[in-house]
Image (cartoon, rainbow, N blue to C red):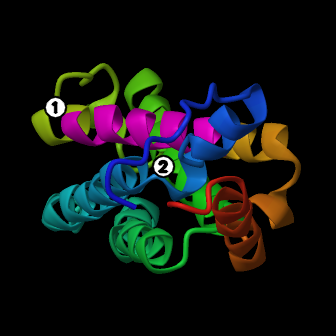
Amino acid sequence: MPGATSQLRTPTPHTMALQRPVLAMDPAVRAVTVIGLITVGIVHALEIQGQLHGAVWLTVGFSLLAPVATAAGLWLLARPSPGAWGFSGLVCLSAACGYILTRSIPVPGDTGDAGNWLEPLGVVAGITEIIVVALAALVLSSVLRAGGIGEIVSTRFLERLNARRRAEDPAA
């Protein structure tokens, strides 16, 4: 109605919490994580050639990590869920642990990498893996704090959240 004014409402803590984006569904957090996972996949795909003459177990590991990291990123992009977040974090955590292991001690079939901490693609992959693990841990902890794994990311939860918002502010 022209000229009508509405009273300003002071948001309550409950409505303020409803207006915050759910971390698990935050597009920026998901985008950074997906880009990180795809980066890890690309770096390990580029490194396969250098592993062909080394230990077979490392070649197999690099050959599996490249598509698995990329698939984890695509899964997270298509269907963000606690399972996708957990899998993404575990993929990058295992890759980071492998990097630390092969740089810390001589391992069978790859004794030359011990102490080689500054290999450029390894540094890129390591930093990216740490970021993905940290984001996955933050998201999963926020899911647990918010009331449970199944509830927070389900479609029904998001529908109820939007219904509450509409009920509290019919003008929106």
Residue that lies at the very extreme toward the right in this rendered image: 147
User: What's under tag 1, amino acid-wise?
Assistant: Glu
The reply, left or right, for residue 111 in relation to residue 158 is left
Tell me the magenta residue range. 124-139
Location of mark 2 (residue): 92
Badge 1 density bin: few <14, some 14–19, many ≥20, Cα 10 Å: few
Which residue is at the front of the view, 70 or 31? 31
Q: Residue at x 28, y 42 (%)?
A: 125
The reply, left or right, for residue 93 in relation to residue 65 is right
Q: Residue at x 80, y 43 (%)?
A: 146
User: What's under tag 2, amino acid-wise?
Assistant: Cys
Residue that lies at the very extreme toward the front in this rendered image: 3
Quadrant of the rendered image containing residue 149: bottom right
Residue 130 shows up from this direction: yes
Location of mark 1 (residue): 119
Quadrant of the rendered image containing residue 102: top left
| As drawn, 140 above or below 62 | above
Q: Residue at x 53, y 46 (%)?
A: 21
Marks 1, 2: nearer the viewer: 2
Magenta span dominant secondary structure: helix
Query: CA separation, marks 1 and 2?
Result: 18 Å
Q: Whole-percent x and y of residue 140? A: 69, 45
Q: Residue 73 colored magenta?
A: no
Q: Whole-percent x and y of residue 6? A: 51, 41
Identify the element where label 1 is drawn.
Answer: loop
Q: Whole-percent x and y of residue 123? A: 23, 31
